Image (spheres, rainbow, N blue to C red):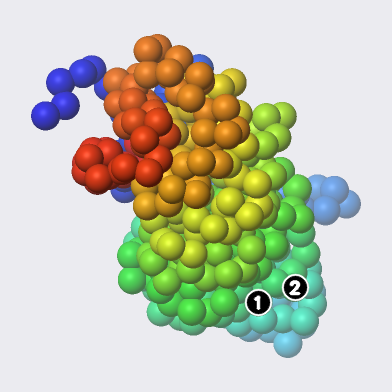
Amino acid sequence: METDVQSNFTYMGRTFTNLSINGSSSAFSDCNSDRSGEFPTASSQSRRLFLACASENSDELMEQLVSDLESSSIDEQKQAAIEIRLLAKNKPENRIKLARAGAIKPLVSLISSTDLQLQENGVTAILNLSLCDENKELIAASGAIKPLVKALKIGTATAKENAACALLRLSQVEENKIAIGRSGAVPPLVNLLETGNFRGKKDASTALYSLCSVKENKVRAVKAGVMKPLVELMADFSSNMVDKSAFVVSELISVAEARPALVDEGGIPVLVEIVEVGTQRQKEIAVAILLQVCEDSVAYRTMVAREGAIPPLVALSQSGTSRAKRKAETLIDLLRQPRSGNSAATAVARTSGVSV
């Protein structure tokens, strides 16, 4: 039984304990509505008129916008998508109204457009509509997953980021996770994690964390080369991505394919450094990962010991959180008895869960 007082936070339906950093309650900032520009500055007069209409929650306006989405004019489609995007962004109640007005299916069609700006506005409108829980199943049932994956592969930078966020939202419905993985979302998310700007990396890591609660998506991520960017981000303390990338590693490490991939990309020295100089949250997740890596491998225990892990582990066993102390003590036992691990393995079986 746990008797210690713990600082809890919940992310994607899972509760983590003793992981607060500087008062922060989450390792991830969840994807929200789009943060891109809303209208060209030249249209300030029409923007003011539109906002005045929007403030009245005009059902007639929404019906007209949905009709315009199916116009033969790309310009009319684009303007309608922009305005729907803004309506859904700024007023939560509009998300349900727009869905009921029939906006989702034509927006899904726009995501497949060869016009990249039209595609971007369609993706972003779908993202904003997906912020309403009631809309998630309808969006997926309307065939949005494959077009969103396509936008994630070939869209503008903003379209890729917002597609990643939209897929994250849809993945919060458990049965969508497998469909998203099987639609090819994981490799482009890994690519966004590696090549995107900070927002893109953050959005990709959050989406991967959600999708990789499913085993087959963990395997897909490892095969797509996810360990390389994750290790690089964990190693860069200035990236503001150490926690996020470490949590994704913790989600992946339970599959056998992940452990040699982590080691091959230089993950062991990075994790040892985190145990030595990271925050309390970072140290706890790093020692939990190392514990799983070392559990069944004498070779990996030897590598961890040779990286000088024992002194910082001893320090953590004395000054860390209660969970970190227990994990550090168990790992120390493994490292000091690398060739006779029967009793230590029993202890690991009780304490090596990465859900710290």
Of residue 44 and residue 343, the one placed in the foreground of this image is: 343
Residue for point 43% across, 18% down: 314
Task: Indicate the amino acid at tag 2.
Answer: Ile
Task: Indicate the amino acid at tag 1.
Answer: Lys
Name the disc covering residue 150, or none. Answer: 1
List the single residue furthest toward the front. Answer: 339
Give the image quarter of residue 232.
top right
Question: Percent x, y for residue 272?
Answer: 56, 32
Q: Where is mark 2, residue-wise?
A: 154
- For the N terminus, the image quarter is top left
Question: Percent x, y for residue 258?
Answer: 50, 59
Residue for point 57% across, 27% down: 308
Distance from disc 2 to disc 1, alpha carbons, whole Å, reads 6 Å
Asked if residue 160 shows in the view, the reply is no
Question: Percent x, y for residue 157?
Answer: 76, 59
**Number of residues whose C-alpha sits closer than 10 Å to that of mark 2, classed few (under 14), some (14–19) or many (20 or more):** few
The reply, left or right, for residue 82 in relation to residue 98 is right
Name the disc covering residue 85, or none. Answer: none
Question: Percent x, y for residue 279?
Answer: 53, 22
Residue for point 31% across, 42% down: 340
